[in-house]
Image: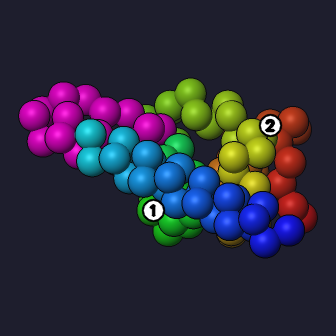
């Protein structure tokens, strides 16, 4: 059991580092003047568990009519689904397939 827990923790650290590296790459592209979709940032911050940044970037994605708004039912968003801002997105989109908590 302890080995499995250790393996899971190590895997989580590796995954988090991968997402942080991807965020840095997005920042580099943005600094060069390239367009980077707010969806990319929202996805990565969600995967990192940074609720505040994930919701900030989802708001930007909403304002840009980004396609990530069609994916809010994805289990990736389960960790931020209870946030009032997330629930507001769901209500604004009026998409019945999105599993928002009441």
Quadrant (top left, top right, bottom left, bottom right) of the C terminus: bottom right
Total number of numbered discs in the rendering? 2
Q: Which residue is mark 1?
A: 53
Judging from the image, what secondary structure is the residue with disc 2 in? Answer: loop
In the picture, residue 85 is in which quadrant? bottom right
Q: Quote the CA–CA distance across marks 2 and 1.
A: 23 Å
Relative side of 90 to 102, left or right: left
Camera-side residue: 48 or 9?
9
Q: Is residue 22 visible to the viewer in this orientation of the structure?
A: yes
Q: Looking at the image, do the residues carrying marks 2 and 1 touch, with CB atoms under 8 Å apart? A: no
The answer to whether 36 is drawn above or below residue 46 in the figure is: above
Relative side of 15 to 88, left or right: left
Q: Which residue is mark 2?
A: 95
Q: Main secondary structure of the magenta part?
A: helix
Camera-side residue: 92 or 86?
86
Of callouts 2 and 1, which one flags the residue occurring earlier in the amino acid sequence? 1
Quadrant (top left, top right, bottom left, bottom right) of the N terminus: bottom right
In the picture, residue 78 is in which quadrant? bottom right
Camera-side residue: 2 or 84?
2
Is 52 covered by the magenta stretch? no
| Location of residue 10 in the rendering, given as x and y in whole percent from the top left corner | 58, 60
At 29% across and 40% down in the image, what residue appears? 26
Camera-side residue: 88 or 23?
23
Judging from the image, what secondary structure is the residue with disc 1 in? Answer: helix
Magenta residues span 26-42
At 77% across and 45% down in the image, what residue appears? 75
Q: Residues within 10 Å of mark 1 (few under 14, many from 20)?
A: some
Q: Is residue 46 visible to the viewer in this orientation of the structure?
A: no
In the picture, residue 73 is in which quadrant? top right
At 83% across and 54% down in the image, what residue appears? 100
């Amino acid at each position: 059991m302890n080995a499995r827990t250790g393996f899971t923790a190590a895997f989580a650290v590796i995954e988090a580092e991968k997402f942080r590296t991807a965020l840095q790459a997005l920042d580099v592209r943005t600094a060069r003047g390239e367009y980077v979709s707010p969806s990319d940032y929202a996805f990565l911050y969600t995967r990192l568990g940074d609720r505040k940044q994930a919701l900030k970037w989802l708001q930007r994605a909403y304002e840009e009519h980004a396609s990530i708004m069609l994916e809010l039912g994805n289990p990736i968003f389960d960790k931020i689904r209870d946030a009032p801002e997330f629930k507001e997105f769901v209500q604004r989109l009026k998409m019945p397939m999105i599993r928002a908590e009441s």
